[in-house]
Image (cartoon, coloured by chain):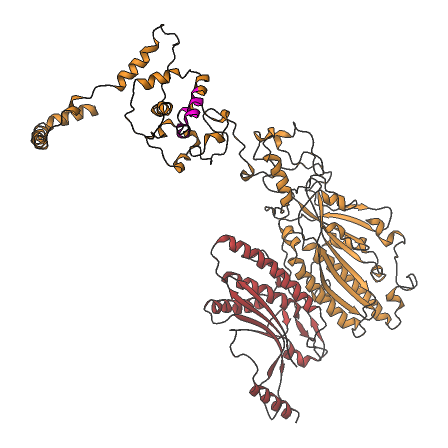
Amino acid sequence: MLASSPLNSSPTINGSPAGQFSLNNPITSAKFLSKHDREALLQYTKHFTRKAVQIIVQSRLGDKKPTKSRVYAHNTDWFNLSIKDLAQITNMTKLSLGNVESLFNSSPFCIEISLRTPENQTMILETWCILFNDQLVDASQKVCFSVYKKMSLVLRSLMCLTRSLPTYQLSRRQNSDTYVLLYRMYCGEPIVHHLGENYATAKVGTVGTPIGSIIVNVAYRTRLTMTPQNSQNSAEYCGIQIKDDHFTPNQLRSESPALTKKQSAAISISPSSPPYSDKSPRSFSDQNSLCKRSTSNLNTICETNLSKNTPKTQPIPMRSDSEGNNMQLKKYRDPDESSADEYNSSSIGSTPDTIYYFKLKSAAFVPSTSFNNNYFSSSFSNLSENDLPPFITLLSNDFGNMSTSDAKNAENFLAQSPPPPNNLVEYQQQKIIPNRHLKMLNNEEHLASPCSLPNFKMLEYHNNNFNEAKSVLNQATDDFVFIESKKVAFGLSDAADDLRTFYKACENAPILDSFQSEPSFSEVLKDLDQQLFNYESKVAEFDDLIKSFEN
Amino acid sequence: MNARTQLFEFSCESRHVPEIVSTIFHTILIHRTAGKHTPKVDSPNAYTIGSVGFCDLDCDFLDYTYVQINSNELAQQVNQEIIAFSEGLKAAECNKISLEFYTKKKRSWPLNFQSENIPWEIWTIKIELMQLSNENERQVLREKLSDMLGEKVRQIIEIMDKPDYTPKLQNQSQLDTIYESEFKDIQPYLFRIYYSLDGTVNQVSVGTTMKRMIKDALSFG
C-alpha cells in the first residue's frame, strides 16, 4: 500500500514556504491570493486537518469526553470549537502529514480505522480522507472569514457524522480481550478495496476557497463480518488468518486433520468462545503507541492502540455469515460423521439448536424408521422382514385378512421360524376361546410412543369369516401367543405338556359360586338391611381393626 | 423571502419520541450555534467569540449516540419543549414539532409595531405513533429507527454543507436580531420550537400577507 503513495517517488518538502515549493502548487501559483491570505489559508488548513484527526480518532477511543463551552476561547480552541488535543494524536499527525502544502499538491491525507483481535486478525473499518480539489474554486469566499467559518461548520459536521457510523458503536464496546480499534495515517490515495463489498461513502463537507476546495469524506465498511476471503482480496495489510483447526470442536482438534483455509465460514466472536491467547508481540495492556518507521519514504506509519480508557463491556458479536453457519452445521449433520457422538456444545459456533438427532439404529422391537410412521395402520408389506419385531406376523390383522393361500404361506413362514408352529393347530383344536375382548385403539393413539410397539394387547379380535387358518391365527390374538415346544429346556421328557395343562386349567377355571347363584332383588334388599345393621353394630370393632393397621 | 423547510417523518413508539427529536434538533443546533459574542470595550463593532463545547448522549431506547452542545440552558429549554410535545402527541393534540430559525425585524416610528419574526429556516419532524404487540417487533423497530436516525443525521449534514443563506452579522447592533443572547456561554441563532397538528391552520393566509405588504410599504416612509 505504501508503494502507491506518490511520496515514494518524491521527497517530502520541509521548511518555509515560497521558493522551495513546486511551481504547480495551487497555493503558491495563485497570484490573486495575497501573501496574508496565503499564509492564513495554510495556517487554517493545518489546524483544520489536525482538529479533524483529533475528532475522528477521539470518537473511536470508546469513551465520552465532554468539553466545556467557554465565553473566552483558549488559544487551542481553533474555529471556536472546544476540542481537546491529545498529544499523541497531534504528534502522529505532524509526523504523517508533514508539511501541509502537500495537501494542496493533490496528495490526500487519509486516516484509517481498523479493528484487531487478540489473534492479530485485522479488519479495516473506515477510511477518512481530506483532499484538495483545485477545480472547485469559490472566489467569493474570503479566507479570513468565510473559509474559517466554513471550516468550523465542517468540523461540527464531522463530529456528528463520526457518531452516526456503525464503527462508533463498535468502538464503545471494544475491549482488550476481544478486539481493539487502531488508527493509521498516511498521505496518498485512499485505500478502499479492503472495506469489503458494498462499502458506503459519505461526504462530510466542502470548504470552498479562492484556489480550490478542501473536501472531507469517508468510506466505511457496511458488512461487519470477518472472513478468510478478506485476506485474498486485500494485498498485504488486511491479512486475516485463522487457525487451521478453528472450526473443529475442541475434542477433535487433536484427532482430525487440519481443515483447509478455503472454508468460507465466518468467525463469530462471542463471549462463549475460548479465550484467545495473546501470542502477539504487542501486548494489549501496553498503552504506548507503536510506530513503524518506513525506510522507503519519509512518512511515518503509526499503528496506535485505541483501547485506552475503555470500559470493559461485552463486545458486539459480529454477525456471522449464514453460509458459514450452514457450513458449520453441515459438518455436524452428517450421520456418517463419527464426531457426531462427540459433539460438544462448547465448540465455536455451536448451540443447542445445532445438535441434530441422528437416525436411531434398529433395536429390538423398535422400528428403525421415523416415529411418525403409523406402524399399525400401515401394511406390513411395506416393512422388510428385518424391521418387524419377532412374531408380529402372528398378531397382525392384515395378516388375518389374507387369503387362504397367503395364510398357508404364513404357516410355512411360521414353520420355518422357531419355534415350530405346528402346535398352533393343536391349540385351535382344543377350542380355547379367549374370554377377553380387546379393542384396537385408533391409529392416532398408536403413535403415542414408539416404545409401545409392538403391544399385543392393542390388537383387535375379529369376528369375520375366516378360514380355518385365519381362525387359528385370530384365536391366537390373545394376551400372548402360546407356542409350545416339544422339547423343554431342563425339563423331563414328558414335561412339554405340563405348562399347557396348567395354562388350560387356569383358562378354564370354574366360576365362583358367588357368581353362579344370583339372588333376587327383594332378597338382596333384605340382606342389605341386615348387612347394614351388622356393620353399624360392629363399628367399634372395625375402628380397632383400622387402628391395628396403622400401628 | 421564503424560509427553507425540511421535513422528517418517523413512525415509532411514544418512548422513542424524545430521543428522536433530541437527536435531530441538537444536530441542527450544533450547526446553528456560534460561540458567545462578547463586545469589546475599546471597539464598538468588534467582539470576541467564545468556543462551543460538546458532549455525547446515549439513547436509552435506541442504539444511537448523538452529540449536543454542552450547554445546560440550551438543553433545558429544548428538553422542555420536547417533553411538552411528547405529552401532546400522546393526547393526539399534535403530531409535528418544528425548530424554526428566524430574524427579528424592527419597526420604526411612527408605525411602532412590534418587531416581526421572519423565519429563514424551518425543520419539522412529523411523528406517527405505533403500538407494537411483542418484543420482537420492538427490537426490529429499534434497529430500524437507529439506522434511520443515522441516515437523517447524514442528510442534515449534507443540507448544512450547501451554500444556502444564513444571516450575516453586519454590526454589533444587529446581534440581538440574529442571535439569541439569553444563554450565557453560547450564541445560537434566534430560534423557537413549536408543535402543531397536521391539518390545522398554521399557514400564512391572504390576510396576513396583505397586512405584511402594507407594513412594508409604510416602513419605507
Q: Main secondary structure of the magenta part?
A: helix
Q: Residue at x 31, y 11 (%)?
A: A498
Estimate the x, y position of residue A540 in percent, counting from the top left.
Answer: 11, 27
Total labels: the figure holds 0
Towards the viewer: A358 or A309: A358
What residue span does the magenta drawing correspond to? A392-411
Towards the viewer: B54 or A380: A380
Q: Residue at x 49, y 34 (%)?
A: A370
For this orientation, the residue located farthest to the top is A493
Above or below: residue A300 compared with residue A502: below
Picture quadrant where residue A530 is located: top left
Left or right: where does residue A187 sit relative to residue A257? right
**Residue A85, visible in the rendered structure:** no
**Residue B115, visible in the rendered structure:** yes
Estimate the x, y position of residue B4 in percent, counting from the top left.
Answer: 64, 75
Q: Which chain is orange?
A: A
Residue A397: say if magenta. yes
Q: Which chain is red?
A: B
Left or right: where does residue A35 sit relative to residue A478? right
Q: Residue at x 68, y 63 (%)?
A: A82
Q: Quadrant of the C terminus of chain A?
A: top left
Residue A295: say if magenta. no
Above or below: residue A97 compared with residue B193: above
Picture quadrant where residue A102 is located: bottom right
Estimate the x, y position of residue A431 in percent, counting from the top left.
Answer: 29, 20
